[in-house]
Amino acid sequence: MDFKPKIIGFLCNWCSYAGADLAGVSRIQYPPNIRIIRLMCSGRVEPYFIFEALKSGIDGVIIMGCHPGECHYMTGNYEAEMKYQLLKSLLTYVDLDNRISLEWVSASEGIRFAEVVTNFTNSIQKLGPSPLKKIDKDSELLFNLNALQIAANDYRLRALIGRKRKILDEGNVYNKKYPKEKFEDLQETAIYDEYQKNRIILYLKKENLSVKDLSERLSIAPNKILEYIVDLRGEGLIDLKDIQELTPYYTAKQEA
Ligand code: FES
């Protein structure tokens, strides 16, 4: 097969980039498909970077940082991991989750760097070219990816994911400890709801729609759509636009 994957690697300056450098000066072979972007810390990688890379047709994105406990900014790699887990969960909705990866590579691990790049390149090779390579801008996949990108920026989701370790280890503000499975169910529900709410907003930016219209487009029961509508109106993101034959039609607010 003539497919040569295009891969972007976000590498932290202090460990993984030095590991890549070591692989280079030691002349360790690895696939030439990766283009490296050096950042000071893996915690600097924002979901926005990954979404933009995927939307531009990049076949795979790998983030590399210092091993846990060795980040030069103390907790940057823990933050990277939390953002990565959020991204991974979001991208399952468009079946792109296996096109991203997170690995820890230290400055002395030139061989490991080459292995990680080789394994990731092989896994992307097996997946084939990104479905976003040749896509028209009105495609459903791009629409859904845009909804996920907005969801990734939601401050409540970020707060939930950001406090995950603390809540699981120490409990919430009422000193109530959450079982891990229960927390993960809660997290998945929050991610799903945020995704669907952003799809609703994007649909309503294009045209005014009723609960029934939205229910058909999102394939979600009308009573659940109504719940989302109530939330979105409460948050000031959508408005009632019109009532036609007793049916309310909604629109997204300009700034939403
Ligand atoms: S400095 Fe390497 S992950 Fe933070």
Image (cartoon, rainbow, N blue to C red):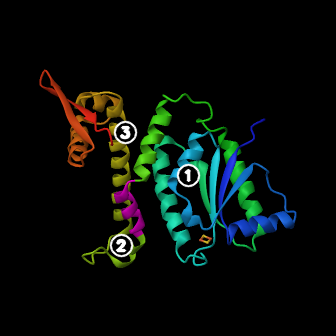
Among the 4 quarters of the image, the one containing residue 170: bottom left
Residue underneath mark 3: 199
The Cα–Cα distance between marks 2 and 3, rounded to whole angstroms, is 29 Å
For the C terminus, which image quadrant?
Answer: top left
**Three-letter residue code for mark 3:** Arg
Seen from the viewer's position, the closer of residues 98 and 228 is 228
- Where does label 1 land, which residue? 49
Secondary structure of the residue carrying numbered label 1: helix
Give x and y (percent) for residue 140.
Answer: 46, 31
Give the residues in magenta: 154-164
Compute the Cα span from label 3 to label 1. 20 Å
Return the residue nearer the eye: 89 or 64. 64
The amino acid type found where label 2 is placed reads Ile
Q: Is residue 174 above or below residue 149?
A: below
Question: Which residue in the rendered view is the most extreme toward the front?
Answer: 255
Name which residue lies at 56% across and 59% down.
Answer: 45
Mark 2 vs 3, N-terminal side: 2
Residue 184 — which label? none
Instruction: Say left or right for 95 vs 28.
Output: left
Q: Give me the residue at 54% from left, 66% from top.
A: 43
Q: Do callouts 3 and 1 mark residues in contact (Cβ within 8 Å)?
A: no
Residue 18: x and y, percent? 74, 69
Select label 2 or label 3 by which is in front. Answer: 3
Question: Splitting the image into four quadrants, where does ligand 1 fall?
Answer: bottom right
Q: Counting residues from the N terminus, which is met first, the one under dot 3 or under dot 1?
A: 1
Q: CA distance from mark 1 to mark 2?
A: 28 Å
Report which residue position mark 2 lands on: 167
Q: Look at the picture and state if 143 lies above or below 169.
A: above
Q: Secondary structure at mark 2?
A: helix
Q: Nearer the viewer, residue 9 or 90?
A: 9
State left or right for residue 37 relative to residue 100: right
